[in-house]
Amino acid sequence: MFDPILQLEHITKSFDGKKILNDFDLEIGRNEFVTLLGPSGCGKSTILRIIGGFVRPDSGRVFFDAQDITMLPPEKRNVNTVFQKYSLFPHMNVEENIAFGLKLKKKSSDYIRDKVKYALKLVNLDGFEKRDTLSLSGGQQQRVAIARAIVNEPEVLLLDEPLGALDLKLRHEMQRELIKIKKEVGITFLYVTHDQEEALMMSDRIIVMNKGIIQQAGDSKSIYDEPQNAFVADFIGESNIIDGIMVKDLLVNIQGVDFPCVDTGFGENNPVDVVIRPEDLEIVKAGEGYLTGQVISIIFKGAYYEIKVKVNDYEWMIQSVDPAPIGELVGLTIDPDNIQIMHKPLRDDEEVVRDE
Amino acid sequence: MNEDKVRNGNKRSLLSGPYALWIAGFTILPLIVIMKYALTDKTGAFTTANLTAIFTDPINRKALWLSLKIAVGTTLICILLSYPMVLAMKHLGLGKKGFSLFIIILPMWMNFILRVLAWQMILSNNGLLNLLLTTLGFEPVRIANTETAIMIGSVYDYLPYMMLPIFTAIMEINEDLIEAAKDLGAGGFTVFRKVIFPLSIPGLLSGFVMVFVPSMTSFVIADILGGGKLQLIGNIIEQEFTTANNWPAGSGLSVMLMLLVLISTAFTMRRKTEGRESALW
């Protein structure tokens, strides 16, 4: 049963005359790990700031536990934020930073001491109480920031690209720890990131956004396997996105060849976008696949090879554990399951983002 | 090659020559001269009487006490005025540097004496202030030639020196920190007390030094606004050198005043060496 803790209704917000959010709706369930995923400027941070109380929407309402909190100032909301730039108070040590919220709530000093100790243990910083925040590494500072937020036992924890400033290895480590912390404290996490891998790994539910509009919402697997438009397909993972024509149900024509697929309901002889993940394409002997083309490049990526095969004018990207020599003619084949059919974009926010 | 480096290094250090010469000629040499005068009497014999005179002579003692009162009062009032003004500027979005800095600095462009004279006109018994008060139906006040008048003049003159470093320190506080404090449940005043004020202390200390020291040692403001009746230690030193022509006495007072000022500002210096830079130096 879906038990919403946060609801955003018809939120509109403009900055300097530019509409960031237009009639935006969102529901977050209790104890969910929800990620807002999208490119920078898509409005995801604005949503977080509206929930945190730092930005007031031009119109629309925010509900917390069915209470309208739209006009409530940040200090009165039962949510806490972990900021991207840590934002630790430089004039306080680790313990004072973490105790900040508890002291304002006039908790007893015994309670505060125990809580700080517990929080530090939770973020793997036992015994760091008296450290100066400026002497900590970026990863440690972010852990303190997380501890500082969760000691207040907020019902919702807002995380604004909290790992954005960390290096890759540390980021992976922190991702696993965040999942662990989430399980331990059992509160709702609303996470904002532009890193699709991070979103796929951590979230119960991902909300993919572009230009202030939700493109798709669902769990990691459905977002990855069944992108609903070209934007999502392109933004989440690597993909081949190519024009196709839906001949009829269960049959799509790509580059003049008919492929069996599993999609229905796109009408007959309608142009569609087709998404095929690079790891789903298989290289076979020339003539044995649906398509035949020439290998034009191969890059070793560690766990696999990234191979480009040119068929007519389109370069297919394939991820394969077996190499293929450049110049060789090869065939390409694919399971019907792995062909994802999408409607052509109706609006520009559904289109692939092009780097100009 | 090493030798080259050394020689280059020496060449470079020559560039500081003019500065060293300036310091030697205009700071160290005068200090030595003043010290010499302070430690000799009119006949040239060694004495410490000039130094102790600041405490032994009742006139000096009274002037020193008044100077301290004015300096402490001025500094406190400047602090109390600076914070609300700076915070107001920040909230009005005047923090976009240029304009608000301009407002703070503007009075400093006028001649110092002129500013003090203007206050004399305003505060005199038939001045603008009383004109305003009587027009509004209030009793006129008699603050010309009082400590209050000196204090008002000092505050007006030295306020920018307090505001500027506090302004700089507060503008440097990352907005994220203020949001983080609110996020953790701090209301407006708590944010100020727990985050803004502690982080502005380096600016406050710079301001303290820049207001306390000159208001302790000045004599022009007391001269004009005190009507020559109220003497600060600065006025006495001035008179020893000019009208009384008693250089040893003046030098002795100067040296002692310098020591007192150094002691009273010493703790601000110690804070600064702890690593957190102050806003102005």
Image (cartoon, coloured by chain):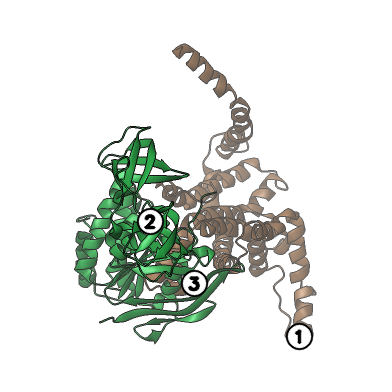
Chain colours: A green, B brown
Which residue is identified by label 3?
Answer: A55
Q: Amino acid at mark 3?
A: Val
The residue depicted at 41 percent of the width and 72 percent of the height is: A52
Using residue A326 as the reference point, say whether residue A183 is left or right of it.
left
Q: Are marks 2 and 3 on the same chain?
A: yes
Q: Quadrant of residue B151?
A: bottom right
Callouts 1 and 2 close, C-beta under 8 Å: no
Question: Along the line of sight, which residue is nearer the eye, B182 or A255?
Answer: A255
In this view, A169 is above or below A59: above
Question: Along the line of sight, which residue is nearer the eye, B279 or A266?
Answer: A266
Image disc number at residue A258: 2
Q: Quadrant of residue A156?
A: bottom left
Q: Secondary structure at mark 1?
A: loop
Q: Secondary structure at mark 3?
A: loop
Residue A28 screen position, x and y as percent:
34, 75
Q: Secondary structure at mark 2?
A: strand
Residue A142 screen position, x and y as percent:
32, 56
Q: Quadrant of residue B71?
A: bottom right
Q: Earlier in the sequence, mark 2 or mark 3?
A: 3
Subunit ID for the residue under disc 3: A
Image disc number at residue B231: none
Q: Amino acid at mark 1?
A: Leu
Image disc number at residue B136: 1
Q: Amino acid at mark 2?
A: Asp
Callouts 3 and 1 close, C-beta under 8 Å: no
The residue depicted at 75 percent of the width and 75 percent of the height is: B129
